[in-house]
Image: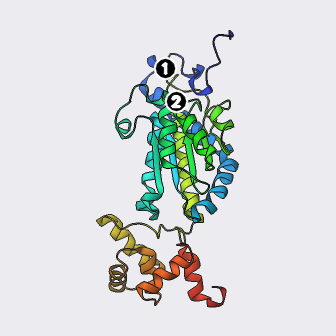
Amino acid sequence: MSADRPALPATERPLARFEGAEDWPLDELLAALWAHQLAAAAAVRSALPALTAAVEAAVPRIRRGGRLIYVGAGTSGRLAVQDGVELWPTFSFPPERVAFLLAGGEEALLRAVAGAEDDGDAARAAMARLAPGADDVVLAVAASGRTPFVRAAQKEARRRGALTVALANDPGAPLLREADVAVLLDTGGEFPAGSTRMGAATAQKIALNLFSTALMTRLGRIHRGRMVALVAANAKLHRRARRLLAELSGASAEAVERALAAAGGEVPTALLILHGLEPARARALLAAHEGHIGRALKTLIHPEDG
C-alpha cells in the first residue's frame, strides 16, 4: 500500500469468497449470503465482555435519571434509531430520556442525505444543544468507525462528561479508541464490497438489542422473563398485558381487567394492585424501588427485606 493510499477499513475490503458472485445460480448466492450473515452474528460473541462493561457502566447513570443518546449516520444511524424508539413501548422507558443524533436529521431515516455524515461541525453543535452530562450514556455507531459526524458527536459528549460507548466493525476504528467503552464487532469484509448494510449492520443490530435489553433487564423492567413494563398502546399489546398479568398473578380475567383499568394501563402497577395494593400505594412502592417490579413484589412477600 502506497503512502498516499491509506489502508481500507476492514468493512470495505472485497471478499474473495464472493468473486464472480453475480454469475452464480440464485440458490448458491442466497446460501452464501445466509452463511455470511451467520458469521456476522457469531462475530458478536467476542464483543460480549465489552457489552457487559457498557451495561454495567450505564446502569447507575440511567438509574440516576440519565438519558440514552444514540448517534449514527446512514444504515448505522437508522439501526440506532430503531433500537431507541422501541424502548418506550417495550419497556416504558420515558421517551424524553432518549435522544437521537442522526446525520442529516429525520429526513435521513427515509433517504440518504448527501454530505451529512461528513459534517462534524453540525454534530458538535447538535450534541452541545443536548448538553449531555455525567449521567447520560451516548451510543455512537459507525461501521468503519471513521465517520466524521459520529466521531465529532462522541468527542463532544465525552468532553462534557457523558459515558461514551462506541460500536464499530473495524479493529482500527478511531471511534473505538476515542470512547470510554469500545465494542468491536469484527465482521470483516462485505458483499458487495463497500456496503455495510449486510454483515456489519447485522452485528450492530444484534449488539444494540443486547445492550438495551440487558440494560432494561437490570433496571427491573423485565420480570420472570416477561416484558412487564410494556405500554399497552394498541389492541395486541393490551391482550399481551392481560395475558401476562393473569400468568403472573393467577387472577381471573375480570380481576385483571379491573386492575389494568385502575392502573391506567400501567402493567407493573396493575400487578401490584392484583397483589392487594391501592393504585397510589402501588405507584409509590414502584417509585421507591426505581421501577423495579421484582424488588417491589419482594417487599410484599417478604416485608422484612424491604
Q: Residue at x 61, y 60 (%)?
A: 61
First-in-chain label (2 vs 1): 1
Q: Position of residue 104 (x, y in %)?
A: 40, 34
| Quadrant of the snapshot with the N terminus | top right
Residue 32 marker = 2
Instruction: Decide if residue 305 is on the left or right side of residue 97.
Output: right
Q: Residue at x 54, y 46 (%)?
A: 206
Amino acid type, residue under disc 2 in the picture: Ala
Instruction: Decide if residue 15 is on the left or right side of residue 28.
Output: right
Q: Quadrant of residue 189?
A: top right
Amino acid type, residue under disc 1 in the picture: Ala
Q: Residue at x 69, y 36 (%)?
A: 177
Q: Nearer the viewer, residue 18 or 272?
A: 272
Residue 21 marker = 1
Q: Nearer the viewer, residue 39 or 188?
A: 188
SS for tag 1? Answer: helix
Q: Position of residue 171 (x, y in %)?
A: 67, 32
- State how many labels appear: 2
Q: CA distance from mark 2 to mark 1?
A: 9 Å
| Quadrant of the snapshot with the C terminus | bottom right
Q: Quick check: marks 2 and 1 in contact, CB under 8 Å?
A: yes
Q: Position of residue 192 (x, y in %)?
A: 49, 23
